[in-house]
Amino acid sequence: MQQPADDNVLERRRRQNVSSYKRWQQGEDIPIYRGSYVGDLHTLEVAPWFRTGQKGAFVNLAAQEIDDGQLNEIAPGGETKIQRHLFESLIYVVDGRGATTIWQTEGGPKQTVEWQRGSLFSPPLNCFYQHFNLDGSAPARLYAATTAPTAINFVRDTEFVFNCPYEFKSRYAGEENFFSDPGEHLARTEWRTNFIADLRTFELDPYPERGGGGVNMHFEVANNASRAHISQFQPGTYKKGHRHAAGAHVIVLEGVGYSLLWNEGEEKERQKIDWKDGAVVSPGHGEFHQHFNTGPEPAKYLALTFGNVVVVAEGVEHQIEYEEEDPEIFDLYASECAKHGAEVKMKRPARV
């Protein structure tokens, strides 16, 4: 006859089901936002964060531990504590202007990169760095998509993750032009760079594949495994529905509209998420999602990911062509545009 497990065994099993990353995160004692989206990074509530010496919050969307979002707020004229860690951090400047000083070794030469709202950059892997808010009258906000969950869960030793002395010289060797080099256009919608001054004005390439009269650019930044891409689509249009692996942080840069999220076989239970500048949407693994512009201007978003989520999702990635989509998609869009006084510039897809 099977005996019931004693309380100690049950407690041990419960603790084993909590990942190393979650245990570390809970100990940081700042807000943690979960679910499918957050409405506005400009106003999201943050709290004092001892690790940075400023304020912060975690944005852990899509129920995944591949990458995370870390929102940092720096007080007017303030500075963070010196940081160093064995995970990548791809940073988008939500608000403010400031500078980040970076150095590879204790007492070694330093480089400083100045940033503003809309900038994108990444401190090279395992380098020391410190952020400074150069505006004495307003806080600055930085949103970092990091690979902390992957690194911490793999090593399972946060002392090593935050105190490893190894220098990744193949990633960064103190090149004087590391942040000033304008970058290289590798191919259509592909650009390699270490710093973008303002994503909102960066010239994009035609990308008709996803629909909506779209333009796009993918970025390789700081020799990272993490990647970023910008996508813009026109007023009165929407993009094709698609799915891929989890881990994409879709940050709205400009425009107003909404996204639909649903799992295969659950089309009647689609989640509708309204968005504007500052919203973040993150679909789950294999979850279909589709973006709709209901405003008078082009809509633009930035997606931060760990690797190429489409390649990682072999067997999961799938795009729904307009003529294959549920007719209710277009009907809802026409209704939403009417509410906002927007003109629909697409014809109702003829379903095959």
Image (cartoon, helix red, strand yellow):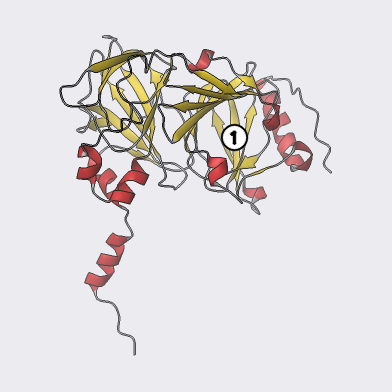
Is 317 situated left or right of 39 in this image? right
State the SS at label 1. Answer: strand
Q: Which residue does the image show at 39% across and 22% down from the upper left?
A: 121
- x then y, percent, for residue 80: 23, 23
Using the image, determine if residue 9 lies above or below residue 182: below
Using the image, determine if residue 102 lies above or below residue 20: above
- Residue that protrudes farthest toward the bottom in the picture: 1
Q: Give the total of numbered labels.
A: 1
Q: Which residue does the image show at 59% across and 18% down from the upper left?
A: 204
In the depicted view, which residue is nearer to us: 145 or 156? 156
Q: Which residue does the image show at 47% across and 31% down from the upper left?
A: 39
Say which quarter of the image contains residue 103: top left
- x then y, percent, for residue 122: 37, 26
Q: Is residue 256 visible?
A: no
- x then y, percent, for residue 7: 24, 72
Q: Amino acid at mark 1?
A: Ser
Q: Is residue 114 visible?
A: yes
Is 10 situated left or right of 185 in this image? left
In the depicted view, which residue is nearer to us: 270 or 318? 318
Using the image, determine if residue 47 lies above or below residue 245: above
- Residue that protrudes farthest toward the left in the picture: 107
Q: Badge 1, how many Cα within 10 Å: few under 14, some, many 20+?
A: many
The C terminus, quarter of image = top right
Is 275 situated left or right of 132 in this image? right
The N terminus, quarter of image = bottom left
Say which quarter of the image contains residue 28: top left
Mark 1 — residue?
259
Q: Which residue does the image show at 33% across and 50% down from the upper left?
A: 154
In the depicted view, which residue is nearer to us: 198 or 267? 198
- x then y, percent, for residue 24: 26, 46
